[in-house]
Amino acid sequence: MNAKLILTLISALVAAPAAAGEWQMVSADAKETVLLQSDSIQIADGEVQVKVVRDYRSTQLNLFDEQWVAHRSKVLVFSVDCGAGKLGILEWSLHSGSHGKGRAAVKGQAAGVVDYVKPANKGDAALLDAVCVKVATIESAKNRLVASAEDNF
């Protein structure tokens, strides 16, 4: 196979936006279930982004702009720093129904520098682990393809 074609395919695999697809449960307890959209992982310029849904067993209340907002689920886009073991929230929406369905009560996105923090709970820790394992697998496959392409020169 042509090395240029292989490198193009690698770039498409790693950087292409994912279509809505498979959800993987990464954590579940009495309070919430954390779901990772497996095919949403994007790696570009060293940044890893992933889409997540947090489903709650009961209605949750969060304070936004001095107003309490009730919701049953959150849809989040995280930036993940596997090396530092930290997560940063890039986008969020709080929904009245489970699995990101129903009316979106609040939507927003990070402005300026993203605040990366260590996982605050079991769900975040499981999410970080799942994403970083997938990223390592993608990077390993990419490196094998690049090495194979270089051997063909």
Image (cartoon, rainbow, N blue to C red):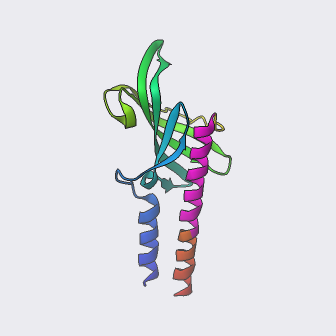
Identify the residue at horizontal 52%, vertical 76% (top origin): 145
Magenta region includes residue 149: no
Where is residue 65? Give x, y as percent.
Answer: 47, 15
Which stretch is magenta? 121-140
Question: Looking at the picture, how far across and down is residue 97, in whole percent?
Answer: 35, 30
Residue 138 colored magenta?
yes
Given residues 44 and 73, the one toward you in this image is 73
Image quarter of the N terminus? bottom left
Quarter holding residue 126: top right
How many numbered marks have been drawn onto this rendered protein structure?
Answer: 0
Q: Is residue 69 left or right of residue 104?
A: right
Residue 63, image x and y in percent?
49, 17
The answer to which image quadrant residue 106 occupies is: top left
Q: Is residue 100 above or below residue 25?
A: above
Name the residue located 53 percent from the left edge and 30 percent from the top edge.
Answer: 31
Q: Residue furthest front?
A: 30
Q: Residue furthest right?
A: 84
Farthest residue in the top direction?
A: 66
In the rendered view, would you say 140 is above or below 26?
below
| Residue 138 percent coordinates (x, y) | 53, 64
User: Residue shown at 49%/20% (left/top)?
Assistant: 62
Give the overall secondary structure of the magenta segment. Answer: helix
In the image, residue 122 sits, relative to residue 130, either above or below, namely above
Q: In the depicted view, which residue is nearer to us: 137 or 123?
A: 123
Left or right of 86 on screen, residue 43:
left
Q: Is residue 38 above or below residue 103?
A: below
Q: Residue at x 42, y 71 (%)?
A: 8
Q: In this orientation, which residue lies closer to the viewer: 47 or 78?
A: 78
